[in-house]
Image: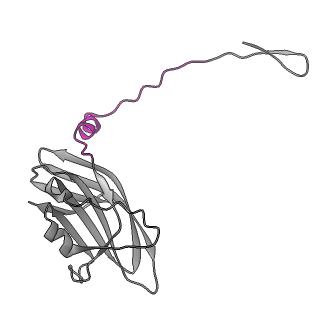
Amino acid sequence: MPINHSSGRTLTLIGIFFTLIIASSSEEKNENLNQIDFEVHSGYFVSNKFEPKKPQSFIVTAEQKSFDSAFGVAFVQGDKSNRLKEGSLQSRLVISAIRRGSFFCEFDVVSLTNNEGELELRYNTKKKKSQTAEFSCPLIISIPKIDYKSVKFIENGKLIKNLEK
């Protein structure tokens, strides 16, 4: 394709075309097939009566009473939190990980998969240290209610908890 240059010369561009082929392993394909749609919820605090001495807690529940014993609703001005809708635990399952300590913990969900009833929640954490405060930070997600055998919590690539049903 000729292009006129300001010096009066004509430049010719030669295009090179190639195809990029991305191969994925069968493990990656299976993981994609087993992905579960999930929703991350916010606007909750961890009850100071729920396992207060543990540095980490894990919850899997479809019962409102159990959910309410662990979490309370935190309202702030201009709040745009994504809370569970009323009655949603009749058709949804809540999976939660809680981190406690002298840091604020941010969660980033990588994936949630179902391998024949074994759920695997992969997430990353990022901690912001505090010299003056203690925090209880929850990751709360919900999925459509399904039958499951166990939930594996994999934090920053490491299995940290396997909850059997």
Looking at the image, which is closer to me, 89 or 86?
Answer: 86
Relative placement, left or right, of 37 versus 146 is right
Q: Is residue 12 left or right of residue 64?
A: right
81 versus 17 height, above or below: below
- 120 within the magenta span: no
Count of numbered tags: 0
- Give residue 7's position: percent from left, percent from top: 91, 21
**Is residue 29 covered in magenta?**
yes
Quadrant of the snapshot with the N terminus:
top right
Q: Nearer the viewer, residue 45 or 53?
A: 45
Q: Is 106 located above or below residue 12 in the figure?
A: below
* Overall secondary structure of the magenta section: loop
Q: Is residue 95 above or below residue 22?
A: below
Q: Quadrant of residue 83?
A: bottom left
Q: Residue furthest right?
A: 7
| 165 horizontally vs 26: left or right | left
Residue found 16% across the figure and 52% down from its top: 91
Residue 131 lies left or right of residue 17; in this view the side is left
User: Residue 145, image x and y in percent?
Assistant: 15, 51
The colour scheme is one colour
Boundaries of the magenta span: 16-37
The quadrant of the image that shows the C terminus is: bottom left
Residue appearing at x 22%, y 60% in the figure: 95
Query: Residue placed farthest to the bottom in the image?
Result: 132
Tell me what residue is drawn at x 28 percent, y 62 percent: 140
Location of residue 142 in the rendering, given as x and y in whole percent from the top left corner: 24, 56
- Answer with the quarter of the image where residue 63 lies: bottom left
User: Picture coordinates of residue 57 (x, y %)?
Assistant: 23, 72
Q: Residue at 42% across / 84% down in the picture?
A: 133
